């Protein structure tokens, strides 16, 4: 198949959010810590009516209805998520109930998990299926999303919730540049979920930040090497990428990630005119550079206008929803397509940096070769973000307590108000004595 990649896409995020400036006040932290320090405006969250199965059901069913696609046209469905409610049964098999009416039970793919990286792995798998001799001519769906919640404390404000549903097939407007891929994986305990009785991760915050930047170094360098060897680009650098989308735990980390790529460009070509103002960092060792705030600020400063052009448009969802873990980079693409007119995107390269703690990371890219207007209009991102309901930090805390108390519940009927869910949202009706979950739709 030719030009395999993203044909269409929709996103789901909860109808309620908490304002980050109000949360600063409520938490008693200094004004600006979440809004400027982390670069976040709003955080989406859900109560006990939603779980990873319901948000995935919502994303898929809304996608199929909006694009008018038949379930019998799908030959592969993969879910990338780290929101686990069952150690054996995949979310993918829960989604198979949507296929029942069509009579299509022949759908490959299961869940794929490693922190925020599962969505990228699922997209690679789906694209490779379409590109392979195993392909039977049908389309593939990827669901990438999570409910990101943290224990109360300094990480809580970096939560969020969102699910992307992505249609993969040939002749796509966003074609995956197959060989242009740089990957970095290593064993590290920065963010992980060893406590099976809790929804919360165990986090070493400072280590997770450094690990993200180390992964930028390696995955970006490996990507540049592919540009050089495979695409025969001389002296590859950020100049060869038109838009750079990052995994966003919070948008300030993305600013740092972009600056870090520029730092790598600098190490590769220290004498380039673009780096005249940062020559004093020539002799800093890479290891030392991670904790060097002066260096970090200097590279943020020299990349300011390039960042505004290449990355800022991809942050609309991240800033207003929060971390969506596996969905993050795809909400980044959705934001970019929403913020930049389709004509301006034609022929352009959109690169992604996907990072999952633990850690697994890749830098890869798509080439825009078709109209993206329909995707933009279908997602209708800015409008939908504006239509949400603001909830006070005190009520948000109550919801978090409810989720904590009812995590892993058995024989349970959720108490959340279904009238506050957007039309077309699946919600949890009941968990029975054998932990079987039943859902209905608003
Ligand atoms: N005004 C402006 N800026 C402020 C203010 C203020 N009033 N107060 C603090 N800041 C700045 C700090 O200077 C700091 O900036 P810097 O990053 O440039 O140094 C930033 O805000 C964050 O403040 P910290 O004190 O470092 O924040 P804290 O340690 O309390 O929490 C952390 C941050 C560790 C990232 C936490 O949110 C966390 O653990 N999150 C979950 C893990 C995570 O998201 N890791 C990122 C990659 S891994 C992943 O994707 C899950």
Image: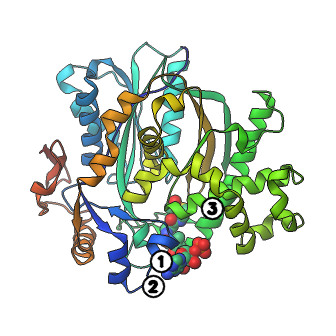
Q: Is 204 in front, or is 15?
A: 15
Judge: label 3 CB < 8 Å from ligand 1.
Answer: yes
Q: Secondary structure at mark 1?
A: helix
Q: Which residue is mark 1?
A: 33
Judge: label 2 CB < 8 Å from ligand 1.
Answer: yes
Q: Which residue is mark 2?
A: 30
Distance in Å between CA atoms under marks 1 and 3: 16 Å
Query: Residue 256's mark?
Result: 3
Residue placed at 78% from the left, 50% from the top? 265
Residue 396 occupies quadrant: bottom left
Judge: label 1 CB < 8 Å from ligand 1.
Answer: yes
Mark 2–mark 3 contact, CB under 8 Å?
A: no
Q: Secondary structure at mark 2?
A: loop
Q: Is residue 375 visible?
A: yes
Residue placed at 27% from the left, 75% from the top? 393
Q: How many marks?
A: 3
Q: Is residue 223 above or below residue 174?
A: below
Q: Is 165 in front, or is 337?
A: 337
Label 1: few (<14), some or many (≥20) within 10 Å? some
Q: Secondary structure at mark 3?
A: helix
* Dot 2 or dot 3, earlier in sequence: 2
């Amino acid at each position: 198949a030719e030009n395999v990649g993203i044909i269409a896409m929709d996103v789901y995020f909860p109808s309620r959010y908490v304002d980050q400036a109000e949360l600063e006040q409520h938490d008693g932290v200094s004004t600006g810590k979440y809004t400027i320090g982390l670069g976040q405006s709003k955080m989406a969250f859900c109560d006990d009516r939603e779980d990873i199965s319901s948000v995935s059901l919502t994303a898929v069913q809304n996608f199929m209805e909006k694009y008018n696609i038949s379930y019998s046209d799908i030959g592969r469905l993969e879910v990338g998520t780290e929101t686990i409610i069952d150690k054996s049964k995949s979310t993918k098999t829960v989604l198979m109930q949507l296929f029942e009416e069509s009579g299509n039970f022949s759908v490959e793919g299961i869940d794929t998990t490693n922190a925020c990286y599962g969505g990228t792995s699922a997209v690679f798998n789906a694209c490779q299926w379409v590109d392979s001799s195993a392909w039977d001519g049908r389309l593939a769906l990827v669901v990438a999303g999570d409910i990101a919640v943290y224990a109360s404390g300094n990480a809580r404000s970096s939560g969020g919730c969102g699910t992307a549903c992505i249609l993969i097939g040939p002749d796509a407007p966003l074609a995956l540049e197959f060989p242009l891929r740089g990957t970095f994986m290593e064993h590290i305990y920065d963010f992980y979920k060893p406590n099976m009785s809790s929804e919360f991760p165990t986090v070493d915050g400072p280590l997770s930040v450094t690990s993200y930047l180390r992964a930028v170094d390696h995955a970006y360098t490996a990507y540049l090497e592919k540009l050089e060897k495979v695409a025969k680009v001389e002296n590859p650098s950020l100049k060869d990428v038109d838009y750079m989308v990052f995994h966003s735990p919070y948008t300030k980390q993305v600013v740092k990630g972009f600056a870090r790529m520029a730092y790598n460009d600098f190490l590769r070509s220290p004498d380039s005119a673009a780096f005249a103002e940062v020559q004093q960092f020539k002799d800093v060792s890479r290891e030392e550079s991670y904790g060097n705030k002066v260096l970090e600020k200097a590279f943020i400063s020299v990349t300011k206008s390039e960042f505004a052009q290449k990355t800022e448009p991809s942050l609309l969802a991240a800033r207003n929803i929060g971390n969506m873990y596996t969905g993050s980079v795809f909400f980044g693409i959705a934001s970019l397509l929403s913020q930049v007119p389709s004509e301006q995107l034609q022929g352009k390269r959109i690169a992604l940096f996907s990072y999952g703690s633990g850690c697994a990371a890749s830098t890869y890219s798509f080439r825009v070769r078709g109209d993206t207007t329909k995707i933009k209009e279908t997602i209708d991102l800015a409008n939908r973000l504006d239509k949400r309901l603001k909830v006070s930090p005190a009520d948000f805390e109550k919801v978090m307590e409810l989720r904590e108390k009812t995590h892993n519940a058995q024989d349970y009927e959720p108490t959340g108000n279904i009238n506050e869910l957007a039309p077309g949202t699946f919600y949890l009706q009941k968990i029975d004595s054998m932990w079987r979950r039943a859902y209905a739709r608003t």
